[in-house]
Amino acid sequence: MQKIKNIAVIAHVDHGKTTLVDKLLQQSGTFASHQKVEERALDSNDLEKERGITILSKNTAIEYSGYKINIIDTPGHADFGGEVERVLKMVDGVLLLVDAQEGVMPQTKFVLKKAIELNLIPLVVVNKIDKPSAEPDRVVNEVFDLLVALDANDEQLEFPILYAAGKDGYAKWEIDDENIDMKPLFEAIIEYVPSPSGSRDNPTQAQVFTLDSDNFVGRIGIVRIFNGRVKRGDEYILVKASGEKVKSRVSKLIGFKGLERIDIDEAEAGDIVAIAGFNDIDVGDSICDTKEPIPLDPMHVEEPTLSVVISVNDGPLAGTEGKHVTSNKIKDRLQKEMETNIAMKMESLDDSSFKVSGRGELQIAILAENMRREGFEFLLARPQVVIKEESGLKLEPFEYLVIDVPEEFQGTVIEKLGKRKAEMTALTPMPDGTVRLEFEIPARGLIGFRSEFLTDTRGEGIMNHSYLEYRPYTGRVESRTKGALVSTENGEAVAFALFNLQARGVLFVKPQDRVYVGMVIGESARGGDLDVNPIKSKQLTNMRTTSADEAIKLVPPKILTLEGAMEWIEDDELIEITPDNIRVRKKALDPIIRKREAREKKKNR
Ligand SMILES: Nc1nc2c(ncn2[C@@H]2O[C@H](COP(=O)(O)OP(=O)(O)OP(=O)(O)O)[C@@H](O)[C@H]2O)c(=O)[nH]1
Ligand SMILES: [Mg+2]
C-alpha cells in the first residue's frame, strides 16, 4: 500500500497557513528547481488574491521521504468555519498554527474545538517567531490551557510543538536551534500524524468534501477514499445525503501533485483524489461499491447564524447595469451556491426574494461580490441573526469577541460594547502596551460595530470574533445612531448641490452620479433621516460660469464597499448591487409612504 499522510492546516485568520504551505511545497522537492511557487499559491481565486485571505479550503500533495502528504489549507476567517469543519473529517492530523505574538484567538478556539471533537491530535506550530514581539512560551501555555478547557484527552495534551517562521521557510524543535529549513516539520508530520486506517481490500467508500468543475468533464468531486479502490472506467454508486442512490462510471480520475493535477487510472484507501463522471455529485455524498454500498455519515456542520434577504432590483435604475436581473437567474445562481457551500442555506420567500443564511457578514458579502462580478444585479437587505426557539424560549446566537486596543481606548470600547449587550469576561494587559479585552456578545450587537470601533480607536484597534452558542434572547440592542440623507429627485448629482449638502453629513455620491427618489446619498450628521435635493443647480441669475462651478471644492465622497454598506444600513433600507455600483436606498422609495411608515413606527414604540 502507498504510504500516505493526510493533514489539514488550521488556525485563526492570518496566522500564516497559506504561506507555510508554500514553503512546504517548495522545500519538498515536488517542484523542479526552475519552477517558481508564487506567493500564497493556494489562494488562487480572484477575491482571495485581492483580499489576501483564504476563502475556500484547497488541497495539494507533496512527497517526502517515500510518503505522499496530502495537505488541505483551510480559511481562518470565522465566517468560513464551515469549510474547516468539513475538511477535518477527511484528514488524520492537523497542523494548528498559532501566531507567536497574537496567541490563541477566537478562531483558534473554534477550529481546535472541532479537531478535538474528532479525536485528532494537534501538531502545534508556534508560527511567525521572527516577529520582534513574539512570545512563544506564553503562546504554548495558552494552547495548553485551551486544550484543558476543551476537555482534551491525555494524548491530545501531549501535543508536539514546533516553532516556525513560515515566511522565512524554517521550523525547529527548540526556539534556539539553528535549523534553517522545514525538515523538522516534515519529520514531525511523518512521525506524529497517524497513517490512514481502512484497507484497499475492503469495499470502496469515499466521501466528497469539495466540488470543482472542468469544461470538458463537467462536475468533479474531490474525495477522500476511506476504503477500497477507485478505478477509472469502473462503476460505483453515489449515495446522496437524502439516501438517494445513483449508479455511474468514473470517467476521469485526477491525482494531485504539488499545484498540478494529473490523470491517473487508480487510487486507493487513504488517498485524496478528484473524480469525474457523476453529474449530481455534491459535497458530503459517498461513493460506494456497487455490490456492497455502505455510505459514510453525511457531513454535519454548525447551523447558519446570520441571514439576509436577496431580491430582484425594483428601483428606477433596474436592469441598466446588470446582465442577470431576473428572479429565475438569481434563484439558479443561489441554488448553485448552496450545492457547494454546505454552511449556507437558502429559501424562497416569494416570487422575487430569497432568504440566504450563512455564518457571517463576510461570507454573505463574498457571495454577493462574486455574483456582481458575474454580471448579477439585485437588492440586499440588512443582515438579521437567525433566531431559534427551543421549548418556548427565544434564543439568539452569541459570539466570542476579542479586542486588542491601546490602553487609552479601553474605556470607550467597553462602554460602547456595553450598550450592545456585551459582557466582558477578561481584561489582560499585553507586553506591547495594548490591552486584550474578551467579551461574550449577542451576534446582533456586532452588526455594524466594526466601522464604529475603527473610528473610535483611530484604526488602531483589532477585533476578532467567532461563534459561541445559542443563548436566551437579550432584548433590544443599540444600532446606528445617525440618519440617512435621502434624495428627493431623479437625475444626476450636481457639484453645486453637493457642496451645499456637505455640511449636513458625509456624502456617498459625487457629481454626475445617478440618483433617484428614495436613494440614500449620504449619512446625516444627526439622528433621523433628512430629505435633500442633490441635483439642484444654482440659479441662472447667479452670474458665475460653469468653470467656476467645476472649481467647487468637494470633500471626496465616502465610497461604500459592500461590507461597509451591509454594516451601515438599517431595516428600512436596502443595498442595490450591480456590476458597476453599490448604492443604498430606502426600502420604500416614495416619500409619502416613507413618512407614513415612520409615523407608525414611532406610534408603536
Ligand atoms: N512575520 C511573519 N509574517 C508572516 C509569516 N508567515 C506569514 N506571514 C504574513 O502573514 C500574513 C498572512 O499570511 P497567510 O499565509 O495569508 O495567512 P493565512 O493563515 O493563510 O490567512 P487566512 O487564510 O486568511 O486565514 C501575510 O502578510 C504573510 O506575509 C511569518 O512566518 N512571519
Ligand atoms: Mg490562507
Image (cartoon, grey):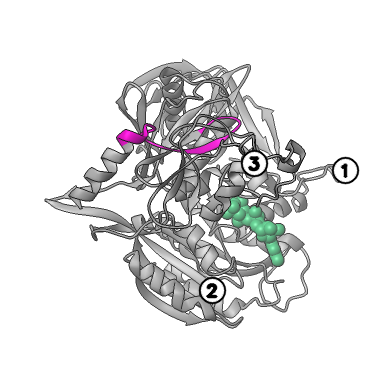
- Please name the residue shown 59% across and 44% down the image: 498
Circle 1: element type: loop
Q: Residue 346's image quarter? A: top left
The disc label shown at residue 34, or none: 1
Toward the viewer: 46 or 101?
46
Circle 2: element type: strand
Q: State which region is magenta.
A: 577-593
Residue occupied by mark 2: 405
Toward the viewer: 268 or 367?
367
130 on left or right of 581: right
Quarter of the image with the N terminus is top right
2 vs 3, front mark: 3
Amino acid type, mark 1: His
Residue 57 at x, y percent in the picture = 55, 44
2 vs 1, front mark: 2
Residue 509 at x, y percent in the picture = 59, 42
Q: Point out the residue furthest to the right here.
A: 34
Q: Point out the residue furthest to the left here.
A: 392
Q: Decide if ligand 1 comes within 8 Å of the CB at mark 3.
A: no
Q: Are marks 2 and 3 in contact (CB under 8 Å)?
A: no
